[in-house]
């Protein structure tokens, strides 16, 4: 039960939004500037500098993406239990910030895995409480728009981070086809700065409403296998459909490797990622507003349809100009789905259980990414670089059918 009335969340706005929405967006902006500079090129660092096989790259990508899953589940539940979402968010952002400098010293794929694992643990601790804090700060009729703003600011950080990375790559190694060790170390050094600034802004500007447990409510201990009990059936079905989609949505490591496989230089790959994230940022807010009017289910299904088309495109592409278009379209998919799916979670669950719900949502996605990436690495190495994309497109199509037939708004 919150001590402040719900109407309090619409007082004193910054550019039309609750201050928490704006400043959490700034925090995510700065964090993404840092993360995109340091971690986006990890598959090329593993392949070009360390000589790792695609199965190892798939393992690193899958464990990295899944490592935070259990932490997201636990931290979401804990934020409901203790009523302190900001505390957990600060802890998570701080852990990731401390881990990043160690990438400068990485010399084996095991070290890369350890650093990336630590970074994702930090992300796991912060993400569910942060999303719950966003939902707590957004009026019900503006959830799509609010999450759309956050995704747009987050992804604008990715655009800036990748633009800086492109400049560094151009200055250090020009248009070389492979990433060099010196180039990557410069990216790490520069990328640490915005990560530190993000933690400072979170501490100073984000304010949490005081919360307390419901009077007389039972306070059971954490039980992973009972967390979904008591949630609406629609939420559980949504999680199942998300798992189906994610099984074909392997780490984006493979999209980057596919671009290099088709002849793209490192500099051009980074520019493609700039375009991807620019499209993501541009689409996020309009997609959120559209979902406020048309409903989340239809918008998510539309985004998954775009994803299926893009993955088919990556499977059959043979020219570099096609890859540029596919990266832009991939950004459109992200912009349509990411914020809207998180707003949909808030629609399906009560406020006092949002932390747990976001933990389950992110946990299902994260845990499924490990087998998804392992399958993609195996398909790439055992058959061809096109097979992971045919597989992902097929499961995305099945998820669209599941979303439209099994879930009602």
Image: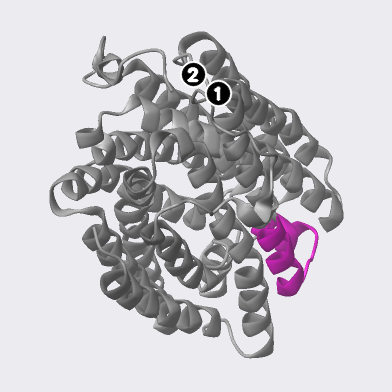
Query: Tag 2's secondary structure?
Result: loop
Query: Tag 1's secondary structure?
Result: loop
- Name the disc covering residue 211, or none: 2
Q: Which residue is mark 1?
A: 83
User: Does residue 2 sit above or below 150 in this rendering?
Assistant: above
Can you tell which quarter of the image residue 251 is in?
Answer: bottom right
Can you tell which quarter of the image residue 367 is in?
Answer: bottom right
> Which one is nearer the viewer's eye here, 163 or 357?
357
Image coords of residue 38 (percent x, y): 64, 41
Magenta-colored segment: predominant secondary structure: helix
Image coords of residue 171 (percent x, y): 57, 39
User: Does residue 82 sit above or below 381 in this rendering?
Assistant: above
**Magenta-colored stretch includes residue 209:** no
> Which one is nearer the viewer's eye here, 214 or 69?
214
Question: Outermost residue toward the left?
Answer: 293
Q: Is residue 38 visible?
A: no
Image coords of residue 307 (percent x, y): 36, 68
Image coords of residue 265 (percent x, y): 54, 61
User: Does residue 285 sit above or below 224 in this rendering?
Assistant: above
User: Does residue 137 sit above or below 116 in this rendering?
Assistant: above
Q: Which residues are magenta?
A: 43-63
How packed is label 1: few (under 14 Cα within 10 Å), some, or many (20 or more)?
Answer: many
Residue at (61, 44) in percent of width and height: 72
Residue at (38, 48) in percent of width and height: 345
How packed is label 2: few (under 14 Cα within 10 Å), some, or many (20 or more)?
Answer: some
Q: Quadrant of the C terminus?
A: bottom left
Cβ atoms at labels 2 and 1 below 8 Å apart: yes
Rounded to the nearest angstrom, the CA distance separating label 2 from label 1 is: 5 Å
């Amino acid at each position: 039960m919150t001590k402040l009335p719900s109407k309090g969340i619409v007082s004193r706005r910054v550019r039309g939004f609750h201050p928490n929405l704006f400043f959490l967006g700034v925090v995510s902006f700065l964090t993404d500037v840092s993360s995109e500079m340091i971690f986006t090129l990890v598959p090329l660092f593993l392949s070009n500098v360390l000589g790792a096989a695609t199965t190892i790259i798939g393992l690193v990508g899958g464990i990295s993406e899944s490592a935070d899953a259990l932490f997201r589940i636990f931290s979401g539940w804990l934020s409901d239990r203790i009523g302190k979402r900001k505390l957990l968010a600060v802890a998570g952002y701080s852990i990731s910030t401390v881990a990043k400098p160690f990438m400068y010293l990485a010399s084996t794929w095991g070290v890369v895995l350890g650093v990336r694992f630590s970074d994702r643990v930090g992300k796991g601790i912060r993400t569910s409480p942060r999303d719950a804090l966003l939902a707590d700060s957004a009026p019900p009729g503006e959830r799509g728009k609010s999450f759309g703003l956050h995704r747009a600011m987050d992804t604008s950080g990715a655009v800036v981070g990748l633009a800086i990375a492109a400049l560094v790559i151009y200055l250090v190694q020009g248009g070389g086809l492979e990433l060099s060790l010196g180039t990557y170390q410069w990216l790490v050094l520069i990328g640490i700065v915005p990560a530190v600034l993000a933690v400072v802004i979170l501490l100073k500007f984000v304010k949490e409403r005081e919360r307390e447990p419901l009077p007389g409510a039972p306070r059971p201990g954490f039980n992973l296998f009972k967390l979904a009990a008591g949630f609406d059936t629609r939420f559980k079905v949504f999680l199942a459909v998300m798992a189906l989609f994610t099984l074909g949505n392997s780490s984006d490591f493979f999209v980057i490797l596919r671009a290099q496989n088709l002849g793209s230089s490192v500099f051009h790959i980074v520019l493609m990622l700039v375009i991807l994230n620019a499209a993501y940022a541009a689409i996020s807010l309009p997609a959120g507003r559209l979902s406020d009017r048309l409903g989340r289910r239809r918008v998510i299904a539309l985004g998954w349809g775009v994803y299926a088309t893009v993955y088919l495109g990556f499977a059959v592409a043979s020219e570099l100009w096609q890859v540029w278009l596919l990266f832009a379209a991939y950004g459109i998919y992200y912009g349509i789905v990411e914020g809207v799916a998180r707003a949909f979670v808030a629609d399906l669950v009560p406020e006092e259980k949002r932390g747990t719900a976001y933990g389950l949502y992110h946990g299902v996605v994260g845990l499924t990414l490990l087998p998804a990436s392992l399958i993609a690495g195996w398909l790439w190495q055992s058959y061809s670089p096109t097979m992971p994309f045919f597989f992902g497109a097929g499961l995305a199509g099945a998820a669209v059918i599941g979303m439209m037939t099994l879930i009602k708004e």
